[in-house]
Image: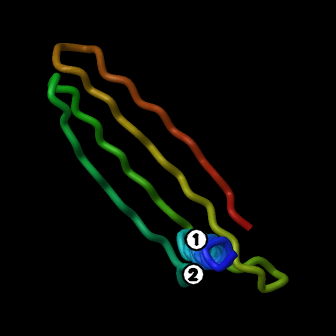
Amino acid sequence: MTKTFLSLTALSVATLGLAACQSAWSPTSKAPGTYKEKSVSTDASGTKRTTEQTTHVYRDPSSNKKAVVETETKTDPEGWFNSSTSKSTKSYN
């Protein structure tokens, strides 16, 4: 009985902790402004990936904080003329 209670308590604490962290990962937790991030990586086969992420955080006319995240990923496998680019946009309320 005691083990079950302790297990449930630990599980509840872990779940609540994770839920609190997820809101901290939201782009709307940042101050209003524009943020840019860039990462470059190359895998073992020589494929180079460049990801550029731009986050625009602003307040709407009702003073609600909103964010728009634009992501552009360029993939360039080793070789000539075979690169590709993908773009995505996501809005957060």
Q: Quadrant of the N terminus?
A: bottom right
Assess disc 1: are there few (<14), some (14-19) or many (≥20) residues with their C-alpha within 10 Å of its C-alpha. few
39 sits left or right of 86 in the view = left
Nearest the viewer among 86 and 5 is 5
Residue type for callout 1: Leu
Image vertical order of residue 38 relative to residue 15, above or below: above
Element on which disc 2 rests:
loop
Q: Out of 77 and 61, give the one closest to the viewer.
A: 77
| Front disc: 2 or 1 | 1
Q: Which disc, if any, is residue 32?
A: 2
The amino acid beneath tag 2 is Pro
Where, quadrant-wise, is the C terminus in this rendering?
bottom right
Query: Can I make out residue 87 in this image?
Result: yes
**Direction from residue 12 to residue 32 in the image, left or right:** left
Q: Which mark is residue 18?
A: 1
Tell me the residue at 58%/79% (across/down).
29
Q: How is the image coloured?
A: rainbow
Q: Secondary structure at mark 1?
A: helix
> Which residue occupies 61% across, 78% down?
6
Q: Farthest residue to the right: give it.
A: 62
- Residue 16 image position (x, y, % from top left): 65, 76
Residue 40 in percent (x, y) is at 24, 46
The picture places residue 63, in percent across and down from the top left corner, at 78, 86
- The residue that appears at 59% across and 69% down in the rendered structure is 22
- The earlier-in-sequence mark between 2 and 1 is 1
Nearest to the observer: residue 53 or residue 1: 1
Label for residue 4? none
Q: Position of residue 27 (x, y in %)?
A: 57, 69
Q: Is residue 17 left or right of residue 45?
A: right
